[in-house]
Image: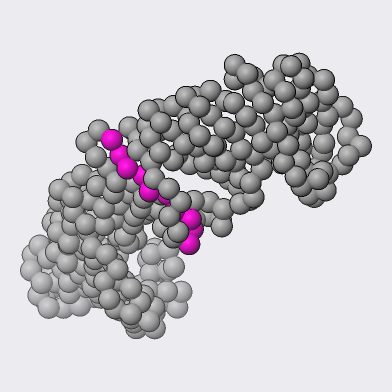
Amino acid sequence: MNTIKKRGLNNAIIVLVCFFLFQNTYSQSKIYFDKDWKTTTKDKAQFYRVVTKKNDSLFHIKDFYINGVLQMNGHFSNLEKEVIEGKVTFYDEKGRKTNSANYVNGVLNGPSIVYLKNGKIEYTTEYKNGKIYNGIYKAATVKYLYKNGVTAKRIEFLSPNDYYPLATTVYGKEKDSVYWYTSKGKKIGFGIYKGIDPINGLDIKKSWLKVTHTYYNNRKKDGVQSIFYEGKLIAENTFANDVLLLNMSLNPLTGKFVTCKYKNNKPYQGHYFVYHITQDYYDEYVYDTGKIVSYKKYKSINGVINTDSPN
C-alpha cells in the first residue's frame, strides 16, 4: 500500500506559501520537489505541487510529475505536517491510478484500494482507526485476508526460486490448516498445526534451496520424510511413531540411492551420505551392527565430487 511518501517542507517556503494562500481563498501556490521530495528550484525539480486553500482548515493538494502528469490528488488539514484529510489518490508516470485511501485527521479510515494497470481493482482493504479491519492486505510476497479486525488467511503468492513451496494458512481458534503448493500452484499436501507446531499431515520446512517434507500423526513423525536440494531428492527417512527406521540417501558418486537401517533411532546396518550444503561437502558412513566400519569425506568443487578427499 503506497502511503504519503514525502516530504519535509522547508519552513521558510511553508511560511511564504501560507502567506499567499491566506490572501485569497482560492489562490494557488506552486512548490517544486526533487526526486526525494525535498524542496528545490524549478530547474532541478522532478515533481511540483499546486496548493489551493479551500477554507481555514483544508487545503486541496495536487502533486504532479515534472511533465505535468498528475501524481497525487487529495486534501491536507495541516500543510506543514502534511496531515491528510478525506480521500487521496495516487497515479503513476502515465497517469494511471495506482491506489487510493481515506483518512481522518491523518489516520487511515475506510476503504483503501489498489488498482491494476488496466484500471481494475486488484484488492481492497478496509481500515478502522489506522488498523486493518476487513479485506486484503498485500506485503512483499504475502497476502493477508482480514475479517472484523482478525487475520483469517495468509497466502504466499511469490516463490524466491523454483524449488521453494508456497503455503496458504487458514487461521482457526485453536488449530490452523496449511495448504502447501508448488510455485506454479499445484497442490502438494495439507497439514494441521497448533501455532507453529505440526499436529497431523504434511509439514514443509524451507531453508534456501533445501526443502524437507515430513508427515505427522498426533504430533509424531510418521511415514516417509523427503529431503530435496534444488528440487532434487537427496534423502528419505522412514519414521514410525517418531522413531527413525530407515534412511535412504543419494550416493553422489554413482547417482544411485543407498540404505541404512536404524535401531533405537541410531544407524545400525548399511551406509548413508550426508550433504553439508553450506560447506559443500559429503560425509559417507558405513555401519555394521551399530558400529562405524568406514568413513569418508568428499569435497564438492563446482558440483564435481573429489574422490581423493582424505578420510
From the viewer's perspective, is residue 47 above or below residue 124?
Answer: below
The count of marks equals 0
Q: Residue at x 18, y 57 (%)?
A: 126
Q: If the image is split into quadrants, where does the N terminus sit? A: bottom left
**x, y percentage for residue 220?**
44, 27
**Which quarter shows the C terminus?**
top right
For the question of whether residue 135 can be seen, the reply is: yes
At horizontal 49% and vertical 24% (from top left) the residue drawn is 242
Q: Which residues are magenta?
A: 175-184
Question: Along the horizontal axis of the image, is 103 left or right of 235?
Answer: left
Residue 287: x and y in percent read: 76, 22
Residue 269 horizontal side relative to residue 154, left or right = right
Question: In the image shown, does 291 or 77 lie closer to the viewer?
Answer: 291
Which x, y percent locates residue 223? 50, 34
- Could you tell me residue 15's position as x and y percent? 24, 62
Q: Specify how the rendered protein is coloured.
A: one colour
Farthest left residue?
Answer: 55
Magenta-drawn stretch contains 304:
no
- In the image as oriented, which residue stretches furthest toward the right? 308
Residue 177 placement: quadrant? top left
Residue 181 lies, with reference to residue 253, above or below; the image says below
Asked which quadrant contains residue 14, the reply is bottom left
Residue drawn at x 32%, y 62% is 2
- In the foreground, 87 or 238: 238
Nearest the viewer among 44 and 161 is 161
- In this picture, is 162 found above or below 167? below
Residue 10 in view here: no
Compared across the picture, whether 209 is left or right of 42 comes to right
Q: Main secondary structure of the magenta part?
A: strand
